[in-house]
Amino acid sequence: MMGMSPEGIAALNRDPDFAGKVAIVTGGGHGIGATIARRLAAAGAAVALIGRNEAALAATHAEITDAGGTCASLRADVSSETDVERAVSEAVAEFGALNVLVNNAGIAGPSTPLADLALSDWESVLAINLTGVFLCCRESIPHLRAAGGGRIVNIGSVTGKRPLVNRTPYASSKLGLVGLTRTLAHELGMDEITVNTISPYLVEGPRLEGVITSMAAKRGIAEEEMRAELVADSAMGHGVKEDDVANLALFLASDAAANMTGQDYNVSAGSVTY
């Protein structure tokens, strides 16, 4: 940039400073959650990882602490009220406060027409993707208030705002998350607690590969054809990366986003613009 020093340019490219902040990241053992957790820890936050996969939690915990970060890993199922109560309490007891909650835990669920969908499959997706966010928010709100304010960042999906054939439970859970975000932002605004959703699309990684495989099988087409069909919606001709989502998550969790709340932000390479 003309007129800006190298130091100033470098500052623009750095993550926000989270020194002295405490963050909970659900689904923090792998994928987007692990990437956000690593970035928060590298920026100075003490990070509590919550998830069901102990091996994945341990691996991300080791990455963070080996890099000099501060981290705790807490096994919990976000759809379990008692698990969430315990995990949030343990995180606050460990680090003394709570400033940021990142609700990332989620499951892809089946690729099945609604007419053939088992009730148990419907309920399991809603339990993790929507009820889990409700429980984590409810248990975290008193601690965010006690800290004088804070940030809640929910990881949704573009699929919550546009049709994706045979993915009704997932789509319903993610659109429900938008409604939760908008309403909760108004409930917590006077407490200086912001609530926002990030809606990614086609995030590279094992989950996307699994979804493409299941969708292609259900449609009876090749995986390459399924992928091409999905990417065709993108203005840029490709999907996104976990770090693209983390970039926005860290911004929304920072002081720079203090007056941004109740919003749903796409990270979709232009696949959806509403």
Image: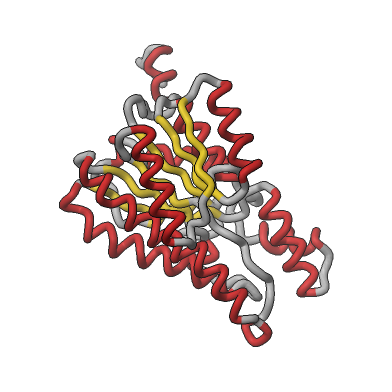
Percent x, y of residue 220: 82, 73
Residue at x 20%, y 53% (from the top left corner): 189
Whether residue 124 is visible, yes or no, is yes
Left or right for 198, reference 144:
right
Does 143 appear above or below 8?
below
Percent x, y of residue 53: 62, 48
Residue at x 59%, y 29% (from the top left corner): 62
Percent x, y of residue 35: 55, 38
Choose top left, top right, bottom left or bottom right for residue 59: top right
Q: Quadrant of the C terminus?
A: bottom left
Q: Quadrant of the N terminus?
A: top left
Residue at x 40%, y 40% (from the top left corner): 91
Number of labels in the image equals: 0
Q: Which residue extends farthest left?
A: 190
Residue at x 50%, y 46% (from the top left corner): 50
Left or right for 257, reference 87:
left
Residue 62 vs residue 246, the one in the foreground: 62
Choose top left, top right, bottom left or bottom right for residue 258: top left
Does 225 appear above or below 114?
above
Residue 26 vs residue 224, the one in the foreground: 26
Percent x, y of residue 254: 33, 36
Residue 73 vs residue 30, the one in the foreground: 73
Whether residue 241 is visible, yes or no, is no
- Please, which colouring scheme is shown? secondary structure
Choose top left, top right, bottom left or bottom right for residue 210: bottom right
Does 5 appear above or below 170?
above
